[in-house]
Image (tube, rainbow, N blue to C red):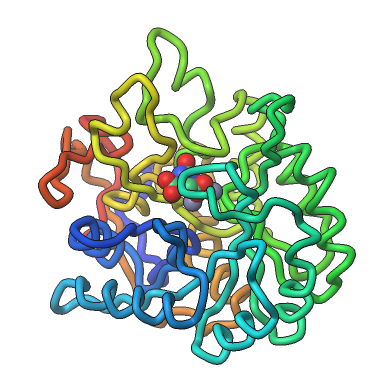
Amino acid sequence: MNPKQQITLRAPDDWHIHLRDGAALARTVGDAARQFRRAIIMPNLVPPVVNAEDALAYKTRIQAEVPAGLQFTPLMVIYLTDNTTPEMVREAQAAGVVAAKLYPAGATTNSDSGVTDINNIYPALEAMQTCGMKLLLHGEVTTSDIDIFDRERIFIEQILGRVVEDFPTLKVVLEHITTAHAAEFVGQAREGVAATITAHHLLYNRNHMLVGGIRPHYYCLPILKRGYHQNALIEAATSGSPKFFLGTDSAPHAQGKKETACGCAGCYTAFSAIELYAEAFERAGKLEKLEGFASEFGPDFYELPRNTDTITLVREPWTLPSGLQMGNESLIPLAAGETLNWRLA
Ligand SMILES: NC(=O)N[C@@H](CC(=O)O)C(=O)O
Ligand SMILES: [Zn+2]
Ligand SMILES: [Zn+2]
């Protein structure tokens, strides 16, 4: 039987993306808006987006960069710090902010202002639970004695389990999961606990990053794990469970900040996101599960309407550019120069 030549999906959304600010926005917003109708915008700017006012101002800067003729709605998030008050949460919620993000201090790019002890945000979490604001987590512990490959598992054991129990009706998304432990935890957690999965964690494992030379463009946090974990993520994403949905974690770092002695963490996937996911789902023989993951389970979790228009992917092999322009810097997309089977029509 011939493989499918084209697939039509309900239009997808991205439930975790980094757009940055200033000159980067023309690139990042344009790419995101060509791929998705809505996106959850990460607040890890420098300084971070910590309250309603910051979020609304940032939203306006993003909207100004949406290319003419495209529909794109940024869904805003505030960044939790040790000083986030219940009042700030309520104000943000009233201003249309949909979620607050927990970055353990020091866990990842631009997390210096993050939370130093989960107990510091218990009053904020209480307010979030009451007003229905979602909690998004970068789920890694940061203590220096914990191995980088174990940081997600230990975070789940030490912190996430407790938060999910202490706030039984708080809606929680464990972002960009990378391990079998995370997939299992979320799969069997109470209602209202979900996870996003990136395209790169479905397509790659740590061998891709480290065998035959070190490839900085595959370096992101949480770091790629072994193939066993990659397989568990593929299993979760293609299972049809509404607890797992699309979040690219696309994060632009200029070429010079990646290809250097101490390179930044983050992969730029916004340019070809849905095509990368289609590749991963096809390899798993589960293309028919892509629509739920990309276009249905996310809005359902966030209690937003599903998009009503569609996109079409055609089987038309194409080669990703070797580089992109971001302001006056060069940006290397993930899988630069590689060929993808599916192309967004
Ligand atoms: N994923 C990454 O490696 N980097 C993200 C931050 C994050 O999501 O942890 C970034 O902002 O660059
Ligand atoms: Zn993160
Ligand atoms: Zn991220």
**Residue 198 appears in the picture as rendered:** no
- In which quadrant will I find the C terminus? bottom left
Which residue in the rendered view is the most extreme toward the front? Answer: 83
Q: Residue at x 63, y 59 (%)?
A: 102
Which residue in the rendered view is the most extreme toward the top? Answer: 212
Q: Is residue 167 above or below residue 95?
A: above
Q: Nearer the viewer, residue 237 or 68?
A: 68
- Report the number of discs: 0
Q: Is residue 130 above or below residue 2?
A: below
- The spot of residue 214 in percent (x, y) is 40, 15
**Residue 38 appears in the picture as rendered:** yes
- The spot of residue 85 in percent (x, y) is 67, 77
- The spot of residue 177 in percent (x, y) is 62, 45
- The spot of residue 232 in percent (x, y) is 67, 37
Please give left or right for residue 140 compared with residue 19 in the image.
right
Q: Is residue 227 above or below residue 320?
A: above
Q: Residue at x 42, y 68 (%)?
A: 39
Q: Residue at x 41, y 48 (%)?
A: 278
- In which quadrant will I find the N terminus? top left
Which residue in the rendered view is the most extreme toward the bottom? Answer: 94
Q: Nearer the viewer, residue 150 or 82?
A: 82
Q: Residue at x 84, y 53 (%)?
A: 161
Please give left or right for residue 334 compared with residue 55 in the image.
left
Q: Nearer the viewer, residue 278 or 52?
A: 52
Q: Quadrant of residue 83?
A: bottom right
